[in-house]
Image: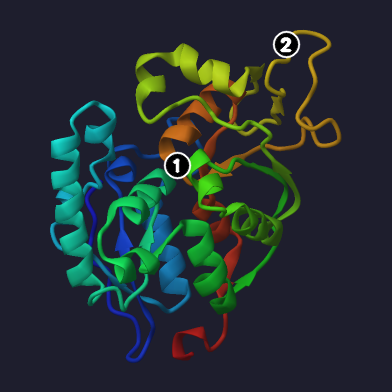
Amino acid sequence: AKLQQPAPAAAGAPSVVYLATCVSRSMGPARGDMETDSIHEKTMSLLGKAGINVVMPADISNACCGLIYDSRGLPTQGDEQLRKLEASLLEASNGGETPILADTSPCIMRMKDYFTNDKLKAAIYDPTEYAAKFLLPRLDITAKEKSVAIHVPCSSKKMKKDAYFEQIAQACASEVTVSPVPCCGMAGDRGLRFPEMSGGGVASAVAAPPGEAMVLREPGSSSGKGGRTWPADVSGSCSEGFSTSRTCEIALSLQTGTHFKSILYLLDRCSTPKQGAAEA
C-alpha cells in the first residue's frame, strides 16, 4: 500500500512516529470483509481524531525489521535490515524522544529484543498499549458492537500486552471473547506455504459466512457433533475477531470462517474526537 504523509495536526499537538510494517504494507483487507480500508488509513483516522501529529520514517516503503529474513535462515540480511530500521527510527523519533507506534506485534518484539539503543526500544509501542495510553484519553468511545472475539498473538503474550487488548475491546463491545488458542500456528509466513500448520494451531472451527456468527472450537476438539465451543456462553454471537498481526489474522480467518483484522479497526469504528482533544 502506498502511504501518504498526513497533514500536520494543530500547533503544539503531541506527535507519534508511525511505523507501517512491511507485512501490513503488503497484506491488505481480505476479500469479502466489510472493512475495505487499509490498516494505515484506519491508523491515520484514529490519530487524526485524537489530534496527534504523525511523523513517517524516511524511506518507509523499504522499511523492514528483518524478521522474515532471519526466519528463513538469512540472519546476516535480517540484521542488515534491522540496523537500517533502527537508524531510521532514531532519526524520526529524535533519538527516542517521540513515541513510536508500530502496527504488527511480532515486528515490535523483534525491535525491542534486538535494537541496541535502549531509549529507542522503550519508545516503541504495541498498537493496544499505544491506544490505551495515548488514544483513549483523547477519544470518546461508544460500545457499538454486541460481541467480539480477540486473539492475542504469541509475541504480545510474551510482551505481556494481554490486558491492553481486553481494555480496548471492552471499551468497544458489550461482550468480549478472549481466544484460548495459545498459538494460531501461522509461524510467520509458514502457514501460507503449509496450511495444515495453521489448521492444527486453531484446531478447526465451524465455518460461517463473513459477517455471520462464528463458533470457534477449543484446541483438540472435533469440528463435528459434540465438539466444545469457545466458550459455550457466547458461541454463535461473535461476528468479528481482532488481533495485531496480519498473518495471525489470516490464519484465524481461514480456520474460523469469520474475518479477523487489526483491533485498530474496532477502535476507529467506535470512536469520535473528544472535544478539546486537539488542543490538549
Q: Is residue 67 above or below residue 164?
A: above
**Pick the front one: 114 or 161:** 114
Q: Is residue 63 above or below residue 180?
A: below
What is the x, y in percent for residue 79?
18, 44
Residue at 35% over, 87% down: 10
What is the x, y in percent for residue 184?
53, 28
Inter-mark Cα distance, 1 to 2: 26 Å
Amino acid on which the number 2 mark rests in the picture: Ser
Q: Which mark is residue 16?
A: none
Secondary structure of the residue carrying tag 2 is loop
Q: Please give left or right for residue 11 compared with residue 125 in the image.
A: left
Residue at 41% over, 60% down: 43
What is the x, y in percent for residue 53?
34, 77
Q: Is residue 38 visible?
A: no
Residue matched to label 2: 222
Q: Which mark is residue 245?
A: 1
Precedes in sequence: disc 1 or disc 2: 2
What is the x, y in percent for residue 158?
52, 46
Q: Quadrant of residue 139?
A: bottom right
Residue at 47% over, 58% down: 127
Secondary structure of the residue carrying tag 1 is loop
